[in-house]
Image (spheres, coloured by chain):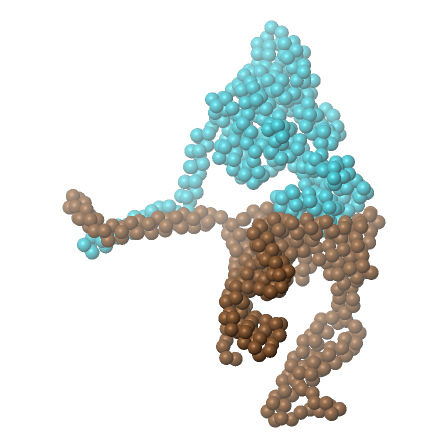
Amino acid sequence: MTKLKLSLLFLSVMSLAIFIACSTETETITEVKEVIKEVQVDRVSTLKTIQDRGMLKCGVNDNLTGFGVLTSGGSFEGFDIDYCKAVAAAILGDASKVEYVPLTASARFEALGSGEIDMLVRNTTWTASRDRDLGNDFTATTFYDGQGMMVYADSGYKAIEDMDGATVCVLQGTTTELNLDDRFTSAGLDYTPLTFETNDPLQAAFEEKRCDGWTTDKSGLASKRAEFPASAGGPDSLVVLAETLSKEPLGPLTRDNDSEFYDVVQWVVFGLIQAEESGITSANVSSMASNPKDPGMARLLGVAFGDGTVADFNFGVDPTFIQNAISAVGNYGEIYERHLTPLGLTRSGSLNDLWTNGGLIYAPPFR
Amino acid sequence: MNVFINKLYIWSRSQKNRDLLIQFIFVIFVGLFFYYLASKARLLDMTLSHFSSRAGFGISHTFIIDYTSNDSRWVSYFTGVINTIRVCIVAILFASLLGTIMGVARLSKNILFSTISYLYVEILRNTPLLIQIIFWQIIFLKLPRISEALTFGNTVVISNRGILLPSVTGSNNGNIWIILIIISIILALIVSYIVNKREDVEGKNIKLFNLKINGNLIGILLFFTLTISTYFILQQPYNLDLPSIYQNNKGTFLQSGGFEFTPEFGGILFALVMYTGTFITEIVRGSIQSLSKGQTEAAQALGLSNYQTMTLIVLPQALRSIIPPLTNQYLNLTKNSSLSVVIAYPELFMVSRTIMNNAGHALPVFFLILITYLSLSLAISMFMNIINRRVTRIGT
């Protein structure tokens, strides 16, 4: 009996040893890579999945006025939300077929990577590490943001240079504190940073003038300014300084290796920009479609010009997908006007103006 | 093969053998699990080499270390560690004091005192610490704004940027004077020891103007003569530093001078003191109640006053059962100090979070944080164990 027990023990130890010997470090890496590859093969066509499901799952912010907010009526509204609607209209022909998934900043990339959502439109900055390391693909920039500084209007500050010795409330971020310090130390200015982890205690401190300035992305500042309580002075008591401390291009993301869906999202973004450039709005899109002014407009709207044929770019969706998107949410200018102008984010002269007006909003040609 | 299976079958019929097999399989799975974790961790960069690079961010509260954003991440980390230690030491002192007072008050025959203590414990013990921290921050923010700061005759300035108190600043001679003070303390102790010994052993008294004086008095006199005379010899190395506020040419209010007590430090300090104080109150009350009633009665029979009974008889004996649970509360307080991250007090956890946000490598940084908290806790335990050994000594 003892002999048998011993031999069994020996057998198990041997198998364990063989197992450990086989799974060396490099093999673990290849294993992990294979798992990733398998998962990616599974997910190759998000476009097909959305068409089969009849619903687009869109990861959004539910607490940033102007960009993505859950209204008291229970619906989602904002600049980013309109891009979800535009993509749903383009793929499914119906802007209401969107399932909004509110996400926190820390959970957003996991939600996209795990397939919980199809695309992420949640004021996310395009950076190299997020694009490559985290397995995302940024489609295009819909809004050129940057870190800004908000101060009280009665403080008399006109520029960062005036803020020597000031106390600045800053929200902990990936680079927010670094940009702030770079700007102040390079100008030889003294300052005290008060670094908060979440927005609510920061706002409480700022309302009581514990700090002279509040720094985060300009879109965030505009949004917080728009909803600044009247008891603390209301939006008019605050100004966002003109200077921008960093580059923060925002836009929709899809998963890596998902070209079909990626291309559709990207060209919906471009299509809405081109629509503004060509003067197509949600009001005149149907009359333009029935009687396009030129071949370029006909290609954009997916209709025939004169007696010609319809140009199909093989996006895997209806050739009229841009037309559907425009009739659902309007062109880029209309979306901006609807959500961001009320926040006080002036468009004219900014980076977010059309390239024809000196801005950076530009679409490659539709041909 | 059949023979083998047959033997295995017979072998497995014994309950003992089956148990052995199950345990063995379990051990293998646990081993594999840890092997898996270790193999994953091996793929990560577990070094802290990025801590030598420039930090690049500012810290609002610096103490002892004069940190700037040009220092390395190590310096910023230790600035955070010092902030943690600073708030913990002050909070432990005040929480112990508050807890002892409230614990004694809880047993007082005076209805007012015992009710106050009862309400204090029941309200603050049963609300979350995080809420209390934010509550105290808001209270401090409700102080006057800096443009309307209250000043009390150039000695105290109160605003929600901080309460400024008078302090002293040292010149170059300041450190020399501190060393001279330490030397004079040692001298005074030696002299008073020798004089007392002479008095005890040889019965010789020193008389001054027909007054009999003992060693302690001589020691104290010596200490004061030395420190005061060296203070003037070194041309007054310390000056009173009075706080003030003023506006620069751009209209920014600036504070200068004095000791600054900020709302962030105040918020976390008050919350930790009040919250931990409730548990210490209960410990003190329990320890006093665990003493035999005969002790109090005997003390009163000897004619000791209530105050003497408490300080000479009850508390010294209660201390024996107070110290061990008190150590737990000190450890809890130290660990709870990491919650100050929500109100912008830059303690070690908050500074580490900023470093992790900037540079990644979260796992090794978390190990560093764990080791730091562990060291702090072990230091407190060691200190409290020494005290515990002293108070539990019997017969000396």
Chain letter for the cyan part: A
Question: For the view shown, which residue lies furthest in the top direction?
Answer: A307
Q: How many marks?
A: 0
Q: Residue at x 33, y 49 (%)?
A: B26
Pinpoint residue A117: horizontal percent, then vertical percent. Answer: 52, 31
Is residue B204 rendered to the left or right of residue A156?
left
Chain letter for the brown part: B
Q: Residue at x 63, y 44 (%)?
A: A198
Is residue A133 rendered to the left or right of residue A64?
left
Observer-nearest residue: B84 or A266?
B84
Is residue A153 rendered to the left or right of residue A285?
right
Question: For the view shown, which residue lies furthest in the left direction?
Answer: B3
Pinpoint residue A347: horizontal percent, then vertical percent. Answer: 73, 29
On the rendered image, what quadrant is the C terminus of chain A found in?
top right
Observer-nearest residue: B34 or A337?
A337
Q: Is residue B304 above or below residue A232?
A: below
Observer-nearest residue: A157 or B142?
B142
Q: Is residue B168 above or below residue B8?
A: below
Q: Is residue B295 above or below residue B133?
A: below
Pinpoint residue B219: horizontal percent, then vertical percent. Answer: 68, 82
